[in-house]
């Protein structure tokens, strides 16, 4: 039997925008504009994505099986229904594995630089 962690490790490291999109979806489904705002917030304004870049990334993440599209309820947003996205179990494993990788890297940096660098 294949270990899911081994399968996930093959995709790491993630590009920063990919990680931020997956991280944005880690606490629940969101539509595109909410993802854009959240990515900017998580990155403290360091990553500002255009809508075109975001939707290309979302399409790629859907193709990879890391996210899936869900329909938002019509009564919440009258008019044309917006498409929302959520992590798949595979996407959850990938974002968790990348977070663990980044934590290990941060720990190594703290050990090398000392704790007084903040």
Image: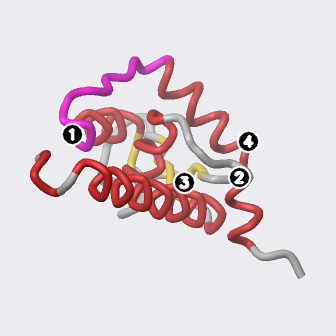
| Residue 103 badge | none
User: Can you identify the residue that label 3 sits on?
Assistant: 70
Answer whether labels 3 and 2 touch (C-beta < 8 Å): no
| Residue 41 badge | 1
Quote the CA–CA distance across marks 2 and 1.
25 Å
Pointer 3 or 2: first along the chain: 2
Question: Would you say residue 27 sits in the magenta stretch?
Answer: no
Name the residue: 55% across, 62% down. 97
Image depth: mark 1 or mark 4 in front: 1
Q: Furthest-right residue in view?
A: 1
User: Can you identify the residue that label 2 sits on?
Assistant: 65
What x and y, as percent, mark residue 72? 43, 52
The magenta region covers 41-52
Q: Furthest-bottom residue in view?
A: 1
Pointer 3 or 1: first along the chain: 1
User: Can you identify the residue that label 4 sits on?
Assistant: 63
């Amino acid at each position: 039997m294949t270990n899911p962690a081994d399968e996930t490790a093959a995709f790491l490291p993630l590009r920063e925008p990919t990680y931020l999109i997956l991280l944005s979806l880690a606490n629940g489904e969101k539509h595109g504009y909410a993802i854009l705002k959240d990515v900017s917030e998580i990155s403290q304004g360091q990553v500002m994505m255009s809508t075109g870049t975001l939707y290309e990334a979302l399409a790629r993440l859907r193709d990879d099986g890391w996210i899936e599209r869900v329909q938002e309820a019509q009564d919440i947003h009258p008019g044309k229904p917006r498409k929302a996205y959520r992590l798949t179990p595979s996407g959850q494993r990938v974002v968790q594995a990348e977070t663990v990788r980044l934590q290990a890297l941060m720990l190594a940096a703290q050990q090398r630089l000392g704790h007084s660098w903040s």
